[in-house]
Amino acid sequence: MARFVLPSKTLAFSKRSLLGLISPVPLQLNCSVNCFQNTAKSTIRLRHFLAPEVNLRRKCCPLFPSVSRIKQVKKRLICSVATEDLAKEVQEPKMETPKEIFLKDYKMPDYYFDTVALKFALGEESTIVTSKIYVFPRVEGSSAPLVLDGQDLSLISIQLNGKALKEEDYRLDARHLTILSPPSGRYDLEIVTEIYPQNNTSLEGLYKSSGNFCTQCEAEGFRKITFYQDRPDIMAKYTVRIEADKSLYPVLLSNGNLLEEGDLENGKHYADWEDPFKKPCYLFALVAGQLQSRDDTFTTRSGRKVSLRIWTPADDLPKTAHAMYSLKAAMKWDEDVFGLEYDLDLFNIVAVPDFNMGAMENKSLNIFNSKLVLASPETASDADYAAILGVIGHEYFHNWTGNSLKEGLTVFRDQEFSSDMGSRTVKRVADVSKLRNYQFPQDAGPMAHPVRPHSYIKMDNFYTGKFLSI
Ligand SMILES: [Zn+2]
């Protein structure tokens, strides 16, 4: 889960953003934890861990305003998250107004994607994205329209099984590209789009900032890169080719393992990446720019050597020693406690000052805002070091407990990690302090929402203290 950076600079706890405010329902967590090795140990710890929280909730319930008061506040704001009964009262959306989306309307996708081959030609004026998707129907023989999400994209061409589609074969509006009558069975779709990262001030999708290209695709940023079924139940294997000017963008990164890199004509170069594991598109990442790396290695318990690289602007590189220590500690701890060994040959971290989401667990290419990663002995406090350990661990642990629905389990894992590496009691006091300072006021305010809301208007607004910590 992406992490927001809180404005407070007073406590290391708050610098770590909203990590570890509360744990989810015990039954859910027990179930999830049981999927892993060391279950007995973990489950016992979990019960021990949750007991004080349950008591705290009971004690603090009288502090909450009545349900009707909360509903009044919600009615006034009609914020992005509404309860089921409120849904009836929401006015009909006007043109261009995002629609309210209801959980009850969820449908399984008609089509799945098997593989996705992306090619990025990064440029100063615009970037050309070529996406080749291997599509197959969920139900054999189905030929329902294929609806792809897309926002702020210029469609250049679209081909199906190598043939250009005619205009009457598809429909394009501000948010979707619909293939009206795709063939039944499996087919290739190749879509070329033009995007403008240098003008992308939303900092979602692919954007350019301080001379570097960077992505943020959680929650719905991938639709600003290319037309796609931008939803987490579409899992595919990705290959990525990045082409760019070599002097301006000497470093070209994406998910997975680096297959090949080399020079092209006109001062350009390329890098080919392959992620052998299926992933939802919100975990896609690309970084290109002038960065330098601190390099290290980690040998997994089965003896595989993993290259570790932390990339930053050159001036920040000396401040990454503790982040590297934290990453190696997290990798070792996950093996020792959960039996989970890293599954690729390379793990990259990028820390840049322009990353709006705080921290993001893109598969094998975690991206952080610098302020969550950098520390030097001259200025950093013990609390700063503890905060970096926790957040590096959290994003790394998502490698095995990914997807937003597993956020609670990953928060639990990072809390356990920090407790084992430092003081369990101090960590618990800090977590409860955050719970009371952020979660409780939020639940008493207009941003309160159920753990699983019945509807939403804008997914981004889920990224509140509750969502980050459940
Ligand atoms: Zn997370």
Image (cartoon, rainbow, N blue to C red):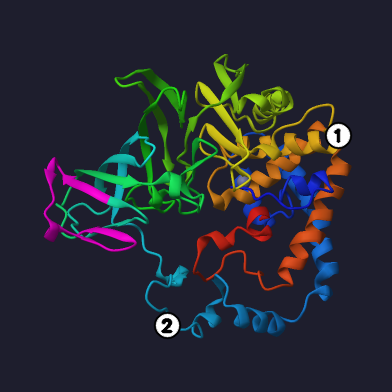
Residue 193: x %, y % from top left: 29, 46
The tag earlier along the polypeptide, 2 or 1, is 2
The residue segment tinted magenta is: 155-179
Q: Amino acid at mark 1?
A: Asp
Residue 112: x %, y % from top left: 31, 48
Residue 261: x %, y % from top left: 38, 19
Q: Is residue 368 above or below residue 78?
A: above
Quadrant where the image shows the C terminus: bottom right
On residue 382, which mark appears?
1
Q: Is residue 91 visible?
A: yes
Residue 3: x %, y % from top left: 63, 48
Cα separation, mark 2 vs mark 1, equals 53 Å
Please state which of residues 159 and 38 is positioned toward the viewer in this rendering.
159
Please state which of residues 128 and 79 is positioned toward the viewer in this rendering.
128
Q: Please rate how many residues cluster around mark 1, counting C-alpha atoms within 10 Å: few if below 14, some from 14 to 19, many from 20.
A: few
Magenta stretch, main secondary structure class: strand
Q: Badge 2 is on which residue? A: 92
On residue 262, which mark appears?
none
Q: How many marks?
A: 2
Element marked by disc 1: helix
For residue 399, side relative to residue 45 (left or right): left
Residue at 76% over, 60% down: 438
Q: Amino acid at mark 2?
A: Glu
Q: Is residue 160 magenta?
A: yes
Q: Quadrant of residue 451?
A: bottom right
Element marked by disc 2: loop
Q: Please rate how many residues cluster around mark 2, counting C-alpha atoms within 10 Å: few if below 14, some from 14 to 19, many from 20.
A: few
